[in-house]
Amino acid sequence: MAKAIETVRLRRTFGEAVAVDDLDLVVEQGTFFGFLGPNGAGKSTTIKMLTGVLGPSGGTAEILGHDVVQDAVEAKRKIGVVPEESALFERLTGPEYLRFVGRMYAMPRSLIDARSEELLQLMDLLEDSGKLIIDYSHGMRKKLSLCAAIIHEPQVLFLDEPFEGIDAVSSRLVRSVLNQLVDHGVTVFLTSHILEIVEKLCTHVAIIHRGRLVADDSLDRLRDGAGATSLEELFFSAVGGHRSIDHRLSWLD
C-alpha cells in the first residue's frame, strides 16, 4: 500500500532539549492512525513538523511523497489540520471563515458555498451562521476547525486532541465524520489522551515517549504482543505509567 506519511530520522531540538529524537514512521494511505504519548512526549511537535508549522532540526518527512520542507506547497495542498488550539479569525462568522479557507485552496465559489452549508448543517452550526467566531463556545470552535480542515477534500487529515473539551454529542458527531473520511480513503492521523476513543477508532497506533518511538504496529498486534487486554494497559506498559498507580497516599492509611 502507498505511504501517506513517512519520516526518516526526523528530529527536533530546542536548545539542548530534544523534543523528537530520530523518528522513523510510516503511515499507509487510508489508515486511521493513533499517535499517542504522555504530555511532553513530542506528539504536537511531530504534527507541527509534518504540517509545515515547525521546521525539523534533522531528518526528513514526506506527505504522499512530497517533502514537507523541499516541496512544502504541494505537501500542504494534500492535508487538512485541526490543531490543539484553534487558530480562527474571531471577527468572522462561521460561513465567512469557511469561504476564506476555500478561497485559499482556489475552490470555486459555488463549491465553497455548497460544502460550507452542508458541513455547518452536519455540525449543528448552521443556526449560528450569523454569530461571530469570538462568541463561539470551545466545542463550536473545534467543530468549525474540522469543517475548515476537510472542506477542500484533503487526502491526509491531522488532528491534535480533537475531543478535548467537547461534549458527548459533539464527540459522537466528530467520530462519525472521521469514520466516513477513512471509509472514503482519507488517512487520519490523530493524537488524543482519551484512550477509549482511540481504541474505538484507530486500527494502527504508535506511542512516543521522551521523543522516541516505543511502539508502532496495528492495535491488535500491539495488544497481543504486550499481553494487554486494552489500549490503556498497552500504553502504561510502553511508557511506564504503572509506577504511580499503586502508590497510596500516606495519610489515607
Image: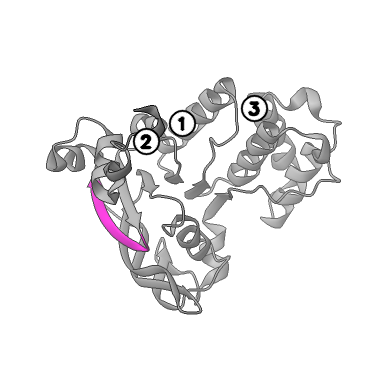
Q: Is residue 186 magenta?
A: no
Going from N to C along the chain, the mark reached first, 2 or 1, is 1
- At 32% across and 51% down in the image, what residue appears? 207
2 or 3: tag closer to the N-terminus: 3
How crowded pointer 2 is (Cα within 10 Å; few <14, some 14-19, many 20+) is rated as: few
Query: Residue 84 location in percent, x, y?
Result: 58, 48
CB atoms at circles 2 and 3 under 8 Å apart? no
Residue 109 falls in which quadrant of the image? top right
Circle 3 packing at 10 Å, graded few (<14), some (14-19), many (20+), is some
Q: Secondary structure at mark 1?
A: helix
Q: Which numbered dot is residue 250?
A: 2
Q: Image quarter for residue 235?
A: top left
Q: What's the magenta region?
A: 210-217
Element type at marker 3?
Answer: loop
Where residue 46 sits: x, y (%)?
45, 61
Answer whether residue 213 is magenta in the image. yes
- Ranked by sequence position, the earlier of labels 1 and 3 is 3
Q: Which residue is mark 3?
A: 123
Q: Which residue is mark 1?
A: 180
- How far apart are labels 1 and 3 at the CA level? 14 Å
Disc 3 residue type? Met
Q: Nearer the viewer, residue 183 or 8?
A: 8
Residue type highlighted by circle 1: Gln
Q: Is residue 67 left or right of residue 105?
A: left
Instruction: Kindly identify the amino acid type of the residue bearing the numbered disc 2.
Output: Ser
